[in-house]
Amino acid sequence: MPACTLQALKQRLSLFPKKNLIHLPTPLARLENLSRELGGPEIWIKRDDLTGAGFGGNKSRKLEFIVADAVAKKADTLITWGGTQSNWCMQAAAAARRFGIRPVLLLFKTTDLRPEYDGNLLLDFLLDADIRVREARKDKLLPAGVAEEAVEEAAAEARSRGENPYAVAVGGSLPGLSMTQPLGALGYVAAFVELEEQARTARLEYTHIVHATGSGATQAGLVAGARALGRPVEIIGISVSDPKDDFTDIVLRIAEETGSALGLDPGIRRNDVIVLDEYIKEGYGVITAGVAEVIRLVFAREGIVLDPVYTGKAMAGLVDLVRRGRFGKDDRVVFLHTGGTPALFPYREPLIRLLTQGAEKSPA
Ligand SMILES: *Cc1c(COP(=O)(O)O)cnc(C)c1O
């Protein structure tokens, strides 16, 4: 029994304040060449890399709700954290600036990349964000505890200057700090509704969604949306950083809180949350030859650029799942492109190295 109809879910979502930051709906298209080449299920793509704010990406959907909350609370400063090439931090800073809010970014060095003005960090600089780079453990996305403490400190400092800061966790995912409801995940409940409507128009009866999971609200919102509507679609999150049990707990918690925030009891069970961790390989932000090859393959066959940290890893996972027979021939899989393409350029060195090993290739 579905807990709710599509119209009723839209109505409930409309009760939350929202700012228009992006162009919706994002395109839904069939990946004909890739589907044919892999010889498995029909593969479709939902282009959330084309949300249209900055260079696009999933965080903008979340920020439509989060920035509206910050504006309602009369915030003049937005404080958050991420890695030095954080897509979240860049999109959060861009969204904040549009509403006259000063962005403060605590950027943890979670990879070996030099923190130079390139990719997202260059965009942060162009936005004149208050950038503070911190040391961190490598290969992990969330410096748990450490980051929260640093944010509290930055918030106290802002308050002592008479500012009104709005603090939010990495990825806009976990409720807490100034964001008392799972507003990020609401963006992905709305995205699920959008996908349902598009799929109906396209007469696409999709059976699976595959995407990258990082801080959890994208998957939580999709799961909450699917369960609220009673859709038996399987949602597979490819972890880019943490073990599956940890992420399953986080996604489940955010999904349950999202159901409550919407005034629904969608009855989400632990086994509704599928997280795969075998594609993390060498850790967060470390790319392998498999990821580099999949970026080349999808660009060449479909003209679509993936990023090295999230969507490249998720697509490498999808390709492997198809090859291992995880899907039936009649299944229809939607790959959610969550953005992240500005990080492609700072990864030029490992990309070139991994794709030219053995071969002598150089443009010079
Ligand atoms: C943040 C991010 C994700 C993961 O989304 P979460 O909601 O944090 O799990 C996936 N892809 C890209 C490109 C991202 O920037």
Image (cartoon, rainbow, N blue to C red):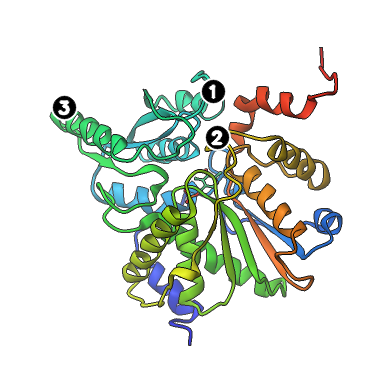
Q: Which residue is mark 3?
A: 161
For this view, does 308 lie left or right of residue 332? left
Cα–Cα span, label 3 and label 1:
34 Å
Q: Which mark is residue 113?
A: 1
- Where, by quadrant of the figure, is residue 313 drawn? top right
For this view, does 278 lie left or right of residue 40? left
Q: Secondary structure at mark 2?
A: loop
| Kind of residue at badge 1 | Leu
- Where, by quadrant of the figure, is residue 283 drawn? top right
Q: Which mark is residue 330?
A: none
Res. 200 visible in picture = yes
N-terminal label among 2 and 3: 3
For this view, does 139 lie left or right of residue 97? right
Cα–Cα span, label 2 and label 3:
36 Å
Vertical order, 40 against 157 (above or below)? below
Q: Crowding at label 1, few (<14), some or many (≥20) Cα neighbours within 10 Å?
A: some
Q: Nearer the viewer, residue 157 or 41?
A: 41
Q: Nearer the viewer, mark 2 or mark 3?
A: 2
For this view, does 88 lie left or right of residue 196? left
Location of residue 131 in the rendering, given as x and y in whole percent from the top left corner: 38, 24
Q: Residue at x 55, y 77 (%)?
A: 231
Q: Crowding at label 2, few (<14), some or many (≥20) Cα neighbours within 10 Å?
A: many
Vertical order, 229 against 140 (above or below)? below
Vertical order, 65 against 292 (above or below)? below
* The residue at label 3 has a CB less than 8 Å from ligand 1: no
Q: Crowding at label 3, few (<14), some or many (≥20) Cα neighbours within 10 Å?
A: few
As drawn, the residue found furthest toward the bottom would be 1
Quarter that holds the C terminus? top right
Disc 1, disc 2: CB below 8 Å?
Answer: yes
